[in-house]
Image (cartoon, rainbow, N blue to C red):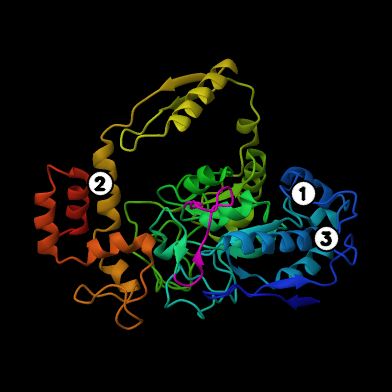
Amino acid sequence: MLQHGTRSPGHRSVGWWHCSRWRPWHSVSGSRSHPWTPGPSWSCPLERLAQKLQDEELSLESVLCSYLEEALKVHKEVNCLTDFLGECEEQLQALKKLKKAERGPLYGVPVSLKDVYDCKGHDSTCGLAQFPEKPAAKDGVIVKVLKAQGAIPFVKTNIPQTLFSFQCSNPIYGQTLNPLTLKKTPGGSSGGEGAMLAQGGSILGMGTDTAGSIRIPATFCGICGFRTTGYRLRLAPGPFDPDRGPGPHPPRPGSGGPQSRKDERNLPPFCSVTTVAGPMARDVESLVLCMRALLSEDMHRLDPTVPFMPFREEVYSTNQPLRIGYCESDGFTQPTPSMARAMRLTSRLLQEAGHQVIPFSIPRIEYAVQHLFVGGVFADGGATFLEKLYICQDVDVGHGIGEGDIVDPCIKKMTNMLCLPDALKGFLACILKYTDPRVSQKLEKFHGVG
């Protein structure tokens, strides 16, 4: 039986629970005496853990309970969770009834999910005040696929308000801290996942990425993340989703919009920018195992618009030399010396391994970022973005619901710029054209199309 535990003060609290019966190796004092425990840093890699669960060397209860307890410890330190998925115990009991031949590659593996992934009976808030207490009617497709492959989703993790930030803070759940240094941010928008995985509160997580929302938290928190190719995995409701009506429909928004049953939570629809789902973990091998599981018949069966292309093991395992392109800088943002050094080191190691490494530069990067990306995201002048914050352009920012949502500091500057009258945006864009050209270009794009 699961007992209700403590709640976080200050913001909307996480419904946390402690395991009272899943203590196969815990003494009364709480010390661990089991010959192997996934303690701090979770020394057992995912591949080995999955094999131990398949071979029944570890019980499903002991592993799930350990991660639940560790996740709570991490949450108390960095405030990275938004919800506990209480149905994980029920799912575990169902998994135990499966025959060995019926077990998926992620059998019994606890998985954490970014807030935006829909789980039946749970909120997907995007950090916006209008969405708590509006639980999803059903699991999103990726959640269904994970469960079909044997994984056990057990917690949801924090995000920045609206997902349009590389920090991780919102008025509902508060600010997530970087576990490596509590004075820093874990990055965004999959910051809760980054913090949770970095401290070993989870062994595998699912994030989303539009402009770095997996890659930035992975970098800041010292873990691994994989941004998949657009539409390779099922992230958004497609044209055949019965809850959306007849298509076509734009993809889900933000640095990972939820697999929602309706479009009511949509931020500006990304017609020119693709948001993707992707795994996050502590090592590359864990990402590979997750992709093997996700690229299954289940994904294609649940959404026929996703091409049936299973994981290509022959390509991943080949010893044939590869041709790999790299650049030390994208030409728009200057990398830190340490990151440039890491790129050079990686290039040298790849060459020593026999691969052909070709340096390249990204053409027309200013046009791609300012016109295609920013212009595509805010083609409506930010009207949809402000609508989701309950803000009209003639209403001040930062008031209560009905006059404006509480705007988190991480998006305050952008929100204020979007709230400016169009004429003032154009005037400021002209003034700043020669002193701060990038801000000038952004103001031009915030004006919208037409």
Who is closer to the viewer here, 313 or 222? 222
438 left or right of 141 in image: left
Who is closer to the viewer here, 271 or 352? 352
Going by the numbered disc 1, the residue's amino acid type is Ala
244 left or right of 201 in image: left
Going by the numbered disc 3, the residue's amino acid type is Ser
Name the quarter where the C terminus is drawn.
bottom left
Please tell me whether mark 2 sits on a helix, a strand or a loop: helix
Q: Earlier in the sequence, mark 3 or mark 2?
A: 3
189 left or right of 352 in image: left
Q: Is residue 445 magenta?
A: no
- The picture quadrant where one finds residue 163 is bottom left
Q: Is residue 172 magenta?
A: yes
Write the start and end of the magenta stretch as one range: 171-187
Residue 218 placed where, x, y %?
Answer: 53, 45
- Name the residue carrying label 3: 62
Labels 3, 1: front one: 3
- Name the residue carrying label 1: 50
Q: Residue at x 27, y 47 (%)?
A: 372
Please tell me whether mark 3 sits on a helix, a strand or a loop: helix
Residue 117 placed where, x, y %?
Answer: 54, 64
Going by the numbered disc 2, the residue's amino acid type is Gln
